[in-house]
C-alpha cells in the first residue's frame, strides 16, 4: 500500500509540474485579485497557473478587517460576488458585508472550477526577460519551506506568455523586475496613506501592464503607482482582478 501511495503522489505531482511548466498566464498570489483574475482568464480558455507562497488561499481576506469575521465590499463589485455565488448583506451607503471564509472558499473554487491550476507552497523569486525591448517570458520559483530555510537551492522555471503580479502590498514580482532589468524603467514609489474612496477607484483605473508581458493587479497596483491604500474593503481588489483578466486576454488574443 505505501509503495502505491508514494508512487501515485510522485507520478501525478511530477506530471502536474511538467504540464504547468509552460502556460499562457502565470499569476503570482492567490489573494482576492489573483483568484478573480484566474477565474475570468481560465473561463476564456487560457491555460492559467496560480503560484501561492502559502499552503492556503485568500491572501489578506482572512485577516481582513483586523481579524474580525466580516469584510466589506462596495456596490460596484456585486456582479463579481454574484458570479462567484458569494452571499452579501447590505450595510448601508452602498457597502455590503461578506463572510471572509466564504469569500476565500468561493473565489478559489471559482478559479479552480473555471480550469485554473493553483499550486500552493511556491515562492516566486525571479522573472525571465528576453528580447529588445525586454519582455517577460517566465518565472523562477522554489518551494516556500526551502526559501524559508535560507539555504541556497537553485529555483526551477515556468514559462508564460503573460505574468500577473498579484502579490499584494510588496509587488514582489514587479520589484524584482525593477531591480534586475533597469532598462524597463519601472519605478516603485510604494503605497501612500489610506484614502479608501479615492483608492478603490484608482486601483482599478491603474490596473494593467507595467512592462511587456508583465501586469499588476490588486495592492501591487498601489505600490507601483504610489496610490493611497484603502483598508479592509475588497471590491477594488476583485474589480482589479477582473480588469487585468480582460486586458491580458485582449493582449494575448491580439498577439496570436
Ligand atoms: C508566491 C506570493 C509571493 C511570492 C506574495 O495580499 P493579497 O491578499 O493581495 P491582493 O492584492 O489580491 O489583495 C490585497 C488585500 O488582501 C489587502 O491587503 C488590502 C485590500 N489591503 C488594503 C490595506 O490598506 O491594507 O494576496 C497576495 C498573495 C498572498 O497570498 C501571498 O502569500 C502571495 O500573494 N505572495 N506567492 N510568491 N513571491 N508574494
Ligand atoms: Fe492590506
Image (spheres, rainbow, N blue to C red):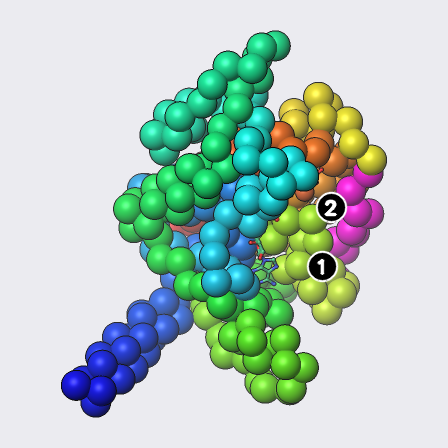
Query: Residue 25 is drawn in which quadrant?
Result: bottom left
Q: Residue at x 22, y 81 (%)?
A: 5
Does residue 139 show up? Answer: no
Q: Is residue 80 left or right of residue 206?
A: left
Query: Residue 13 is drawn in which quadrant?
Result: bottom left
Q: Nearer the viewer, residue 221 or 109?
A: 109
Residue 184 image point, x, y percent: 71, 58
| Circle count | 2
Q: Residue at x 62, y 41 (%)?
A: 67
Q: Residue at x 53, y 62 (%)?
A: 54
Q: Is mark 1 within 8 Å of ligand 1?
A: no
Q: Is residue 188 magenta?
A: yes
Residue 20 image point, x, y percent: 36, 67
- Report the residue that reaches farthest toward the front: 68
Residue indicated by mark 1: 175
Residue 64 to residue 210: above or below: above
Q: Which residues are magenta?
A: 183-192
Q: Is residue 12 magenta?
A: no
Amino acid at each position: 500500500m505505501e509503495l502505491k501511495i508514494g508512487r501515485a503522489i510522485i507520478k501525478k505531482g511530477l506530471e502536474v509540474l511538467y504540464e504547468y511548466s509552460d502556460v499562457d498566464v502565470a499569476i503570482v498570489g492567490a489573494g482576492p485579485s489573483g483568484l478573480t483574475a484566474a477565474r475570468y482568464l481560465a473561463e476564456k480558455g487560457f491555460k492559467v497557473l496560480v503560484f501561492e507562497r502559502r499552503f492556503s488561499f485568500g491572501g489578506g481576506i482572512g485577516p481582513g478587517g483586523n481579524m474580525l469575521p466580516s469584510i466589506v465590499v462596495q456596490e460596484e463589485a456585486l456582479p463579481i460576488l454574484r458570479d462567484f455565488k458569494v452571499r452579501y448583506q447590505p450595510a448601508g451607503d452602498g457597502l455590503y458585508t461578506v463572510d471572509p471564509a466564504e469569500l476565500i472558499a468561493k473565489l478559489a473554487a471559482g478559479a479552480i472550477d473555471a480550469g485554473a491550476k493553483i499550486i500552493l507552497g511556491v515562492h516566486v523569486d525571479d522573472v525571465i526577460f528576453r528580447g529588445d525591448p525586454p519582455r517577460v517570458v517566465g518565472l523562477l520559483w522554489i518551494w516556500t519551506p526551502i526559501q524559508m530555510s535560507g539555504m541556497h537551492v537553485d529555483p526551477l522555471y515556468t514559462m508564460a506568455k503573460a505574468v500577473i503580479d498579484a502579490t499584494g502590498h510588496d509587488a514582489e514580482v514587479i520589484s524584482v523586475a525593477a531591480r534586475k532589468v533597469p532598462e524597463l524603467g519601472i519605478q516603485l514609489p510604494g503605497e501612500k496613506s489610506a484614502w479608501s474612496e479615492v483608492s478603490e477607484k484608482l486601483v482599478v483605473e491603474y490596473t494593467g501592464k507595467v512592462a511587456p508581458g508583465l501586469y499588476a493587479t490588486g495592492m501591487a497596483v498601489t505600490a507601483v503607482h504610489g496610490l493611497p491604500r484603502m483598508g479592509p474593503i475588497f471590491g477594488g481588489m476583485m474589480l482589479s482582478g477582473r480588469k487585468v483578466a480582460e486586458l491580458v486576454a485582449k493582449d494575448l488574443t491580439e498577439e496570436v
